[in-house]
Amino acid sequence: MPKMKTHRGSAKRFRVTGSGKIMRSKAYKSHILTKKSQKRKRNFRHETEVASADYKKIARNLGLR
């Protein structure tokens, strides 16, 4: 059976930590920033863990599991 290929779009959007969590960047931070508060924009900088409902699908795309 051939090797599984990594989904390149997913590889650019997600990263795997040393403990195996899949991290993603937050949405809504690219435009129309004038109406968003400074605190809200600052919090967009941090990564967050992928939801458990999406984990299996994303892990398969990244070549895990």
Image: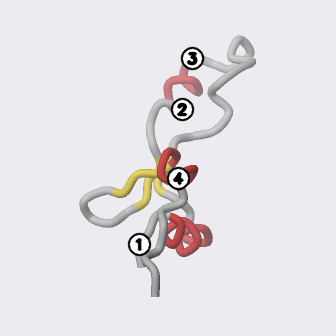
Q: Position of residue 61 (x, y in %)?
A: 53, 66
Q: Quadrant of residue 58?
A: bottom right
- Mark sitting earlier along the chain (2/4): 4
Alpha carbons under labels 2 and 1: distance apart: 27 Å
Disc 2 residue type?
Answer: Phe
Q: Nearer the viewer, mark 2 or mark 4?
A: 4
Q: Position of residue 62 (x, y in %)?
A: 47, 63
Disc 3 residue type?
Answer: Gln
Q: Position of residue 27 (x, y in %)?
A: 64, 38
Label 2 SS:
loop
| Residue 44 tag number | 2
The foreground one among 21 and 64 is: 64
The foreground one among 50 and 40 is: 50
Label 1 SS:
loop
Query: Residue at coordinates 40% horizontally, 51% vertically from top-left?
Result: 15
The residue wearing badge 3 is: 38
Disc 4 residue type?
Answer: Arg
Q: Nearer the viewer, mark 3 or mark 2?
A: 2
- Mark sitting earlier along the chain (3/2): 3
Disc 1 residue type?
Answer: Leu
- Mark sitting earlier along the chain (3/1): 3
Give above or below for 47 relative to 35: below
Q: Quadrant of residue 17?
A: bottom left
The residue wearing badge 4 is: 8
Alpha carbons under labels 2 and 4: distance apart: 24 Å
Label 4 SS:
helix
Give above or below for 65 relative to 12: below
Q: Residue placed farthest to the bottom in the image? A: 1
Label 3 SS:
helix
The residue wearing badge 1 is: 64
User: Taking 61 as reference, is 32 left or right?
Assistant: right
- Mark sitting earlier along the chain (3/4): 4
